[in-house]
Amino acid sequence: MHLTDMKPLTRQLTVLLLIVMLAWMTGCSTNNGNGGQETPQGTNGGSTDAASTTKPEASDSGVYPENGLPKDEKVTLKFGFFEGGMGREYIDYAMDTFKQKFPNVSFEVVYSPKIGDIINAKISANNDDDMFDLFNGNIPGGITPLVLSGKLEPQEDLWDSELYDASGKTLRDIALPGTVEAAIGKVGDHLYALPVSGSGSGLFFNKALFEEHGWDQNPKTWTAFLELLADIKAEGIIPITYPGKYPSYIEHAFGPIKMFELAEANGNLEKFTDDYRNYKLPQHLAPESVDLWNRIYALAQKGYFPEGVAALTHTQSQMQMIQGQAAMVSTGVYVENEMKSALPPEFSWGYMSVPMSEDPDQTRWIRSTASNGHYIWAGKPDLNKQWAKAFNVWMWNLDVQEVIAEKGGQLPVRSDFSEDPARADKLQKAPKAMLDYMAANKSKMERGNRDQTLTDPSVSQAFKLMQEGTIEITSAKKEPLPILEEAEKLIGQAIEAQQK
């Protein structure tokens, strides 16, 4: 790139990042959050004032002026780290720089792609001393049971903590618009994992393959999208792949976010939003839900998903796209980082969001999250919890955010990230492809969160039913309606139980 091109590119990235997060209201390989399960109105777990990362009123040589924590007391934080699509380079960098600044603090880390199972075993052992001080990843059964039993430390106070590198500004001051609302790890009004990165989802593809065949890289309508899939199928290539072993991955491209898009196109957005967020029936039988699943089934009937999809893992499905066996994969922006060892040097990323309307100017709704934060175990000593919270704030330092973008393949959470041209250029190509798409199309990022929660076991049963049903529908083995009707009954039971 010529030096004369740098300023326009920097300005473009700055504007694009702000567009992403200004549109970012509320809304994987990791499946971020709680494994797709909804979370109920929670109780306070542990103390809400166990840590303060704001500066103390008076200078005290025995404490750090940045956070008021003692300099001389040695603390070792046990850390359970999910080693998934983002890798471990960013967290190692964050810990190393934190220890340089605060040498009395050390970390004892367990890295694992199955950290959720390890955490579950420790929870069952019910030994606070042996439990991690802080951990991340997908916890089996979600965080709801832990919150209700007071096992997790609330962290919403950290939004008002001063950043270590922003001259008195707080996280709330510097967060990209929408980050607070999009944060995963909430139960009721409380936050239990401060987000450290943003993410977006959709269909990712190899631009070179599309250019070779002359395929439409930006279909504007549902009909144009169907024509694209037909063109791909005619070349003997699978149009869309996703991992059947983790069926919720299909939601990256065809999840509830697309029901919002359908509702808006139908002039029903206000009612659908209220029903969806507050668990008002219909849910699975809402017109938008039935329409979406019927469309997915129609795609399956035409052979647009892989045969044997039930056996595919997330990396296998992504490899199908990289190797040209499939044209597009339903996944998140972390895909580039997760598959970096398999990518040829010349690989070029493309992105699209599935258009659900016949109006080419219709807003494209894109699934987004602010996540990958660290939970804190409430049963730990207060000083450990204070330092754990301090570390969570440290993750917002610009140099850490830069490593998250460059090495972890995610989007930043700070509004000033792209003010430095060199830092803005550290964004990986897959996230950039998504930002380019958003610049070329009217789009809206949304988490798809619920404002109300259901705790009855019927909710988990409905979730399991839909996960299994996704495989049957995308394999064209079962029509959606009977599955949706059964899931709706289960949700109805949960609503009725909650009202008693």
Image (spheres, helix red, strand yellow):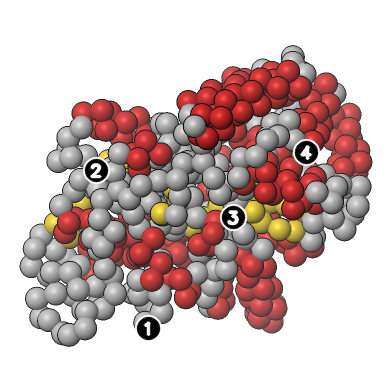
Q: Which residue is mark 1?
A: 167
In this view of the protein, which residue sits in the foreground, 165 or 466? 466
The amino acid type of the residue labelled 1 equals: Ser
Label whose residue precedes the other's in the sequence (3 or 2): 3
The amino acid type of the residue labelled 3 equals: Thr
Label whose residue precedes the other's in the sequence (2 or 4): 2
Where residue 397 sits, quadrant-wise, is: bottom left
Tell me, for residue 132, which label it has, or none. 2
Q: CA distance from mark 1 to mark 4?
A: 47 Å
Q: Is disc 3 surrounded by few (<14), some (14 to 19) or many (20+) residues within 10 Å?
A: many
The amino acid type of the residue labelled 4 equals: Glu
Label whose residue precedes the other's in the sequence (4 or 3): 3
Q: Can you tell which of label 1 and label 4 is closer to the viewer? A: 4
Tell me, for residue 26, which label it has, or none. 3
Q: Can you tell which of label 3 and label 1 is closer to the viewer? A: 3
- Image position of 441 with respect to 300: above or below: below
Left/right placement of residue 20 relative to residue 52 reads right
Left/right placement of residue 277 relative to residue 108 reads right
Coordinates of residue 30 in the picture (x, y in percent): 50, 40
Q: Is disc 2 surrounded by few (<14), some (14 to 19) or many (20+) residues within 10 Å?
A: many
Label whose residue precedes the other's in the sequence (1 or 4): 1
Coordinates of residue 309 in the picture (x, y in percent): 66, 22
The amino acid type of the residue labelled 2 equals: Phe
- Image position of 452 with respect to 121: above or below: below
Q: CA distance from mark 4 to mark 3?
A: 19 Å
Q: Secondary structure at mark 3?
A: loop
Q: Which residue is mark 4?
A: 288
- Please, which residue is most extreme toward the top here? 477
Do tag 3 and tag 1 residues touch (Cβ < 8 Å)? no
